[in-house]
Image (cartoon, coloured by chain):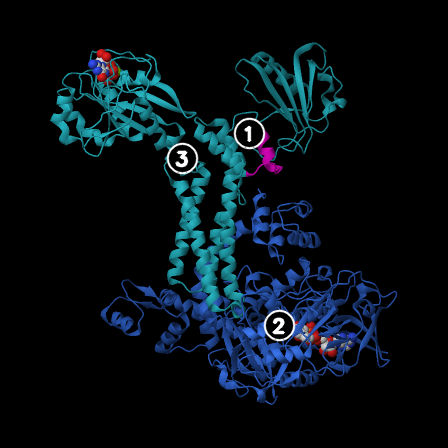
Chain colours: A cyan, B blue
Amino acid sequence: MDHSQSGPIIACATGENNSSAISIIRISGFDILTQFQNYFATNLSFLKPRHVYHTKLLHPLEGKLIDDVVLTYYQGPKSYNAENILEISCHGNPFIIKNILQLFIVNSNVRKAEPGEFTLRALENKKLTLSQVEGLDLILNSQSNFCINEGLKSLCGELHDAYLQLEKLIVRLCSSIELGIDFIDDVGEESFESEKDRSIRDLQDFLERLHERASCEYSTLLSPEIVLFGPVNAGKSSLFNSLLNNQRSIVSNQAGTTRDFITEYINLEGHHFKLVDTAGLRDTKEVIESEGIERTKSLRDLCFYSVLVIDPTDPNFKKDFQQAKDFDLCILSHSDRFDFSESLLKYSALFSNKKFLKANLTDIGPIEPFSGIGPIEPFSGMAPIEPLPFGVGRLKADVWSKYSKLQEKSPIILPRHREQINSIYLRFKRFQSLIECETDMAIISNELNLLSIEIQTLTGVFTQSQVLNNVFENFCIGK
Amino acid sequence: MISFDIIIIGGGHAGCEAAWITSEFNLKVGLITLPDVGLASAPCNPAVGGVGKGQVVREIDALGGLIGKLTDLAGIQYRILNESKGYAVQSTRAQIDKDLYSKNAEILLSQKKNIEILKDEVFKITKISNSDTSNHNNIYTLECKSGLKINTKKIIVTAGTFLNAKTHIGKTQKNEGRVDKVATCSLNELLNHNTGNFLRFKTGTPPRLKMKTLNYGKFIEQKSDTRALNFHWNNDPYKRNLAQVSCHLTHTSEKTMQIIRENQLLSPVFNGQIKGVGPRYCPSIEDKGDRYPDRNIHHIFVEPEGLSLDTIYPNGISTCLPKDIQKSFIQSIEGFEKAEIEIFGYAVEYDVVDTFKLHLTLEHKNMPGMYFAGQLNGTSGYEEAAGQGLIAGINSALSCLRRPPFVLSRESSYIGVMIQDLVTIERDEPYRLFTARNENRLYVREDNTINRLFHSRQSLNLFSEIDIYQKKYIEEFTVLEQALTFKKYYTNQSTRNYFKEKGYGDLNSIITLADLIRRSSLNPVETLTKELTRLGLSFMPEVILSVAISEKYKGYIKRNEIDKDRIDRFNNKKIKWENLVISENISNECRQRIKKIQPHTFGQLKRMDGIRPATLAYVARDLI
Ligand SMILES: Cc1cc2nc3c(=O)[nH]c(=O)nc-3n(C[C@H](O)[C@H](O)[C@H](O)COP(=O)(O)OP(=O)(O)OC[C@H]3O[C@@H](n4cnc5c(N)ncnc54)[C@H](O)[C@@H]3O)c2cc1C
Ligand SMILES: Nc1nc2c(ncn2[C@@H]2O[C@H](COP(=O)(O)OP(=O)(O)O)[C@@H](O)[C@H]2O)c(=O)[nH]1
Ligand SMILES: [Mg+2]
């Protein structure tokens, strides 16, 4: 992609290929608005910037009606990318959209925009910083609320501010070293050393935190999954349905009914979670079932929250229960059965330091966690089993608390930032090991300069065109 | 009417240097200087060199200049500054006998047959009408106080702090360029037209004390360092010309700072009496008291002004407070309890030239044939002045001879850094060299000055003794540098034992002598010297020093070259100063500076004095 191309560009900002009530077509980078006069029934020279006008879009040569549209004119530099922008809201029919685009491209000096080109111009015209552009990318392309939030943070400059703070700290450290070289007679050896050490410490603290944010595992946050595991017929599907308040999954008492994973979304505190019902963990001769089991195992290690559903009255309980420690939560089903308590007593030695939920999953229906009645109820008494308070609500609360803890670490998820913070961190570690043995201030200062270049790369100063390409590659057209 | 090829106005450090080098080109040179001011006199501290400045002295010496020779002739104490901070930033500094220094300047310059020294005052320079600048005929006429009129092809103005100068002690103001030395006309009067430039700077100096009235028992002694190399190439590196004396160290007390703070408003620096801008890095004691309200201990170096002089220079307490207050705060200092003041401290403000209007040759862009050098270019320090004098001198001579100009690069010298800074960046305070101004600090060192400037010196085509010496130096350097990679230590019992005995560390594989001296636990110079002695090889000590140190930095310098490209590209990024000036994200102070100086690239902004890191970060943020 050639970043230096200029001239007016056009694209549909809302997607060309799907029908919708309205679509927005943007033209950016033209010199004067009136060059498009022939396309519209309204006199364009009277258009006030940032006001909305209802008009008709016409064929520029034939004058025939193309669509009924609404126009908004943004005059540069007070526009998204500092260029003149005309926004045409038309009807969201793919044919109309293609028609209009074609009309402008054929009859005016306007070409179709490259992916992300509107934004590239915003970047070039200093309307957005690199971090902001990257944030925008996240907002537009992300799959989870978390990413949208991260994107907003980046767009609003929270990250950028953190980076500037980092830059401030490195500048302070560099200054303290230079002070020690050129003005040692003025400041004295002692205050030089203490200022240097303090600057290093502050930088280290800040960098450690940033590095933690940039290296912490976040992939589960992008699309958090709650996965239900357990032997066949333990009650996974029943639980799944309870959580969804409906009967999405086929419930059957024949082992191996749930052939493949079944996926639905549930909403906790406004965040979407994927709920997955897996096949049973028990061995079987059926190929399709065993495939499912393989996938089950790898899924457990990758998912955000894993639940083991298990029936203590099942003769295989002891064997199946061995893996309980690898799950976030264990639910003991069939609590309504007459032999339930007896089984628990039998296995009581197995239950240690693990969260359990005792549940009766037979009746599928609306669940009232705090009602005290209903299919799921807490297991109480009987140490060492740690009981959880009421039902599904509690399960959800546990999921949420794990999620928000991870979120509190506010992981940095933009790949370029993660990489760059990592190389800054490595440079800094090198710097630290250097100053342990090296007393030559010029060499130390030299290493610091290299470190500060890395930091400036993060803030967007050293952006090579390659980095830019990376940033823009992921854009869909018309933003 | 007499006429000259080159006239130098001013016999200070800049003027003397200019006269010395121009005379080498067999031109007719005139040096006009005030009758009652000694040549190359030291109105401030009796010392030459220092961090960043020691490098300049050696650079001037390597180009055939005078300052190193004068310093060695009058050197009474040598020190290596920043020794613990590594070779790249360490510098030599010498205390001088300031009387001898000035006398020797007079002797050396008057020995030059083609220099005529005229003790007179120039008050007007006029351009000869119809003069053809391209023909290199006489283009300027000078008028002197004595009535003398002189025609000349080139002029180098080095009037120091004298133009329209005013000294201050408390309320007392006098039209003087230094204490008791009458000021001369203003810059505009001298040039006989309004240059549109009314920039004024300020500097100051501490009181001089009578040595016999000090209590030396209370000071810490600092002896002369025998390991510091002399400055001048033709001197034995370690043999001093004069008997060596000590400097001493004392400090201000709580009471000192209390007196100073209480009387702050009596100081012309604070009550608005002085309009000129002083250097932030060279603050008066009043400034220090104000800037560091919690600090009462400030170092004072007690520096002898000469072997036969009975005065000392207390370095660190420059002041222009009223005389009675100077006296009382002086006597509150450890060891100064009974001190008598010989000359009171004072401040001086003076006209300076807008160096933005100069070429890299220091020739004025609007006044061909007219060069400016030294303190009146808004620098401070003898070394800075001398370095400019040398460059202006060489270029005026080359121009007379119609030869191409002589410019030192920023990458290879401090002089190059200074001159580029002076002419490309407008400043609003006096300029001093620091090592931090030099981006190429690992390479631009004291020890390798000849390596750095050999080709530049050769290009002058002067063919004198120094050129023979430098050729020999470079030859020896090349031989020794190669020897470092040829000489190998094989791993056997006897070499292992030898390494152990010398404290060289382990020897697990074959290594070269170069590998050995690069070991971070060893002192490269000592190690190389030891090994060469053992091998029975003899080289000039300065060659050994430079080869050893160069080896140490080689790897780092190479790596820097790779990153340099990146840095350069960044520094060359264009910025819009017009936008910065109205930005709310930049402090008012920075905005003012930016408005004045109008930097066009990020590199220029970075090199501007007084720009806050926050501003740089803010600007960098948008440089995508
Ligand atoms: C009070 C004071 C304090 C200083 N403090 C410091 C300090 O703290 N740190 C520091 O680094 N430097 C300091 N300096 C600066 C240092 O003295 C100068 O940098 C250095 O002397 C400059 O050399 P120069 O050749 O440019 O000018 P000067 O040494 O000032 O020489 C100027 C010469 O020009 C001659 N001259 C002037 N006008 C005329 C004329 N019209 N006709 C003929 N001759 C003329 C004078 O006779 C004089 O010899 C101080 C100087 C003074 C006066
Ligand atoms: N009595 C009783 N029956 C249950 C309970 N949980 C599940 N069942 C029944 O066990 C059978 C298998 O349940 P299902 O949810 O399909 O198990 P899955 O194979 O783990 O998905 C169904 O008939 C359920 O009604 C429970 O807690 N108590
Ligand atoms: Mg099932």
Badge 1 marks a residue whose secondary structure is: loop
Q: Height in image: B469 above or below A426?
A: below
Range covered by the magenta-colored residues: A117-129
- Mark 2 belongs to which subunit? B
The N terminus of chain A appears in which quarter of the rendering?
Answer: top right
Image side of residue B127 versus residue A164, left or right: right
* Residue that carries the numbered disc 3 in the rendered image: A407
Quarter of the rendered image showing ligand 2: top left
Q: Who is closer to the viewer here, B215 or A221?
A: B215
* Magenta region includes residue A125: yes
Amino acid, disc 2: Ile
Amino acid, disc 1: Gly
* Residue that carries the numbered disc 1 in the rendered image: A116
- Asked if labels 3 and 2 share a chain, the reply is no
Question: Are circles 1 and 3 on residues that touch, CB within 8 Å?
Answer: no
Q: Who is closer to the viewer here, B264 or A437?
A: B264
Q: Of the numbered discs in the image, which one, if any, rests on residue B260?
A: 2
Predominant SS of the magenta segment: helix
Q: Is mark 1 within 8 Å of ligand 3?
A: no
